[in-house]
Amino acid sequence: MNHRAATGIVFFTSALVLVIEIVAGRLMAPYVGVSLEAFTGIIGTVLAGIALGSAVGGNLADTGKPRQLIGTCLVLGGAFTWLSVPIVALVGPGMNSSPGSIILLTFLAFFAPTALLSAISPMVAKLRLDSLEETGAVMGNLSAAGTVGALLGTFGTGFILLGLLPIRTIIYIIGGMLVVGGVASRVFWSDSGESSRTVRPDPKLMSVALVAGVASLGTGSPCDYETDYTCARVIADEDLAGGRSLILDQVRHAHVDLDDPSHLELRYASLFGAVIDSEPEGRLDVLHVGGGGFSVPRYVSATRPGSTNVVLELDEGLVAIAEAELGLGDVENLDIRIGDARLALPDLTTAAFDVIVGDAFGGDVVPWALTTREAVSEYRRLLRPGGVYVLNVIDGNESRFARAQLATLSEQFEFVGVILPLERTVRSFNHVIMASDQPFGDIGPLSEAGELLDGAAVVDYIGDAGILTDNFAPAEQLKE
């Protein structure tokens, strides 16, 4: 095998391994969420596939026929890449966001294609090594080609591909490239290394690829929309004509009533509305950290005419969905700023807001960078005297993350409170947390919505919880 062909194959397969790794997180997100634990599980499992594939590929290169094996691995790699779609669709609904589920689903869907493609590099190296005198140069060049390919796969997927194509389309293309490349390899490379058109693709091998391709194309998608960050669906209510629910990665994130923007159905959203209602009468300037379904900006616009809403939203695709299906066009004096909220905070004017609403989530966890002492100092700077910061935190069991968030807020705000549901599940529930430099106003009847803990009660609830900082904010690990 000549230098150019060897370098090209290693570059190509290494790039696709990294494309598969990144795409895996997006394909699995509707079932295991988007979190540090999800990324960790995926990266670790893919690395295990790379390690095993490299070891097995090296042994096969010494005992088998590397030229035929390269083509076989390419075709099977493409077939198993296609099969990841039906595997995730079939097994995913039974999974959750636990590390065990993440690793298991990644293993079932992506371990095989990763291992198969990783087995190719040592086979190529075997074919390139004509003598021991050039071992260092050959291995160094192939390693460099693989690394450059991995870099291209990483940057190209994260910065370009995910913004251009749906996840499944990327998977179909990857599988197709591998199958075609494998067929070409087997047809044009004979065992002796001379070009030959007498070799034909293995019918059994092609049957496997065909079945995998049909299964992949025949698997329905759980998404109505695929944004840069999430799989989204909008579901119409059966008993409310204007009711729409926004589902992000299998989690109901928002509900809007197209006919009545003052109707907030979800418990946490209705409590947001109650906190906003407790502010003095008149127009308000409200900062929303996270837009989601934009139900709260619609509420503010409807109930406080003349108010302004500044929304920091990471996902531009959600804005488009809200404009198309969730009545976002009804909101007046709306300023939506696309990008990472933490990066946008320093650019906002000091003491510019009466209310800050925290409704940003990655899966069911508040992004850690928005929870820390440093972020809280920004919220404190942006609030006017008497203003209130209210946010939703999902936690359960000992509520370690929610209590740490309360501890962090109490360090910089004199008055901190949390509204808890009267009936609390062990697994998870909404903590509507408030912070202000003045006592809270009348939040309205809480007999059905929950129990307000403030003063000494919230101090007892916080207990020995630690402060979250930019240096240490294990949000996913604290959350139950």
Image (tube, helix red, strand yellow):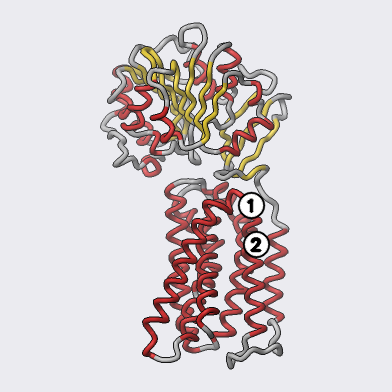
Residue under label 2:
173
Tell me which residue sits at (37%, 44%) in the image: 477
Residue 187 % position (x, y): 67, 83
In the image, residue 416 above or below residue 83: above
Tell me which residue sits at (49%, 84%) in the image: 60
Residue under label 1:
165
Residue 363 % position (x, y): 50, 41
Q: For this view, does 471 lie left or right of residue 101?
A: left
Q: Name the kind of residue labelled 2 in the image.
A: Ile
Residue nearest the viewer, comparing 398 with 252: 252
Q: Name the kind of residue labelled 1 in the image.
A: Leu
In the image, residue 50 above or below residue 98: below
Q: For this view, does 378 lie left or right of residue 83?
A: left
Measured Cα–Cα span from mark 2 to mark 1: 10 Å
Q: State the SS at label 2.
A: helix
Tell me which residue sits at (54%, 63%) in the image: 110
Give the mark nearer the N terminus: 2 vs 1. 1
Proximity of marks 2 and 1: CB atoms separated by less than 8 Å: yes
